[in-house]
Amino acid sequence: MTKQEYQSLLEKQEHQLQLLGKSYNQCAFYRVCAIGWVCGFLYAGYRLHFWPNYLFALLGAAAFFWLVRRHDRIERAQELARAQKEVAQQYLHRMDGSWRAASPDGSEYRRTDYPQAKDLDLLGPNSLFQYICAANTQQGRATLAGWLTTCAPLATIVRRQQAVEELGKKEALAIEMQAYARAAVTGKKAPAGWPRIEQPAQPAILSAMRWLLPACTLLALAAALLGLGGDWAWGVFGGLFGLQFFIALAGYPRNHRILAEVDKFSSKIKPYQELFSLVEGTQFESEE
């Protein structure tokens, strides 16, 4: 690809990020509207004793959860567009000579038993590694450093060259692969590793209340909707619902701390899944 093509790709992703930013803000606004819709129809159903209002509230709740999923998709699209923009910028840095300040130099892969790597500028500042490295993951960079500093059989070297040559002809694929890898590594929810969750022991009464309170709340709601108990049933339902709401608020910091790593991990394996699907769906001729 030429410098103009990379510049065009950069501008395209900047425009895409602007559009996604607008969609992100609209989605957040609609989520607030959906919450207001649900609360309004729940209150109307309670005051007017008109059960179709609860159906409208249920539709609002469904719209809210759909918006939550859409919000997540927009966020992932933003990370991918941002990663593609950064990949295009990296190639532009190589073309204008500013790559020395914008690329990893591989200094951490220097080996004491192979000092020639420094003398030959294979690793370190202004090195061959810094100029050609397009890897975004630690594994990819370590692999490149190993190839540069470890002798290999001639047949293996030829296979690697063929693989690089073939991938070089698939420029769009290469950029997309780099973008997915970069999004997985540099995204704001990128995990450090497999999450470890420690489940603290709970008293037996708390375990029982975890199931008893929702069951009683649903029974009270059913009785109120069926007209059993009159306003008393609605009062019981409101009290139980409010109790669960305040319990959830009190336990939010603890639950968020426990589940934060799971949320990060589940969010960030998506780029890896897309990357693997991209590779599996592409026909390669080289063996490496």
Image: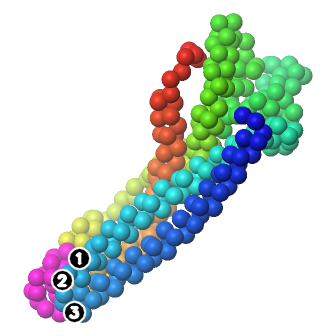
Q: In this orientation, which residue lies closer to the viewer: 12 or 97?
A: 12
In magenta, the rendered stretch is 218-233
Q: Which residue is mark 3?
A: 48
The answer to whether 204 is drawn above or below residue 262 in the figure is below
Foreground of the two, 124 or 44: 44
Figure quadrant of the C terminus: top right
Q: Tell which of 193 and 64 is nearer to you.
A: 64
The image shows residue 152 at horizontal and vertical percentages of: 69, 11
Q: Residue furthest top?
A: 154
Instruction: Give the SS element for disc 1.
Output: helix
**Residue nearest the observer in this picture, 203 or 246:** 246
Q: Which mark is residue 51?
A: 2
Image quadrant containing the N terminus: top right
- Look at the picture and state if 98 lies above or below 173: below
Which residue is the site of mark 1?
A: 55
**Labelled disc at residue 23:** none
Q: Is residue 27 above or below residue 158?
A: below
**Residue 130 visible in image:** yes
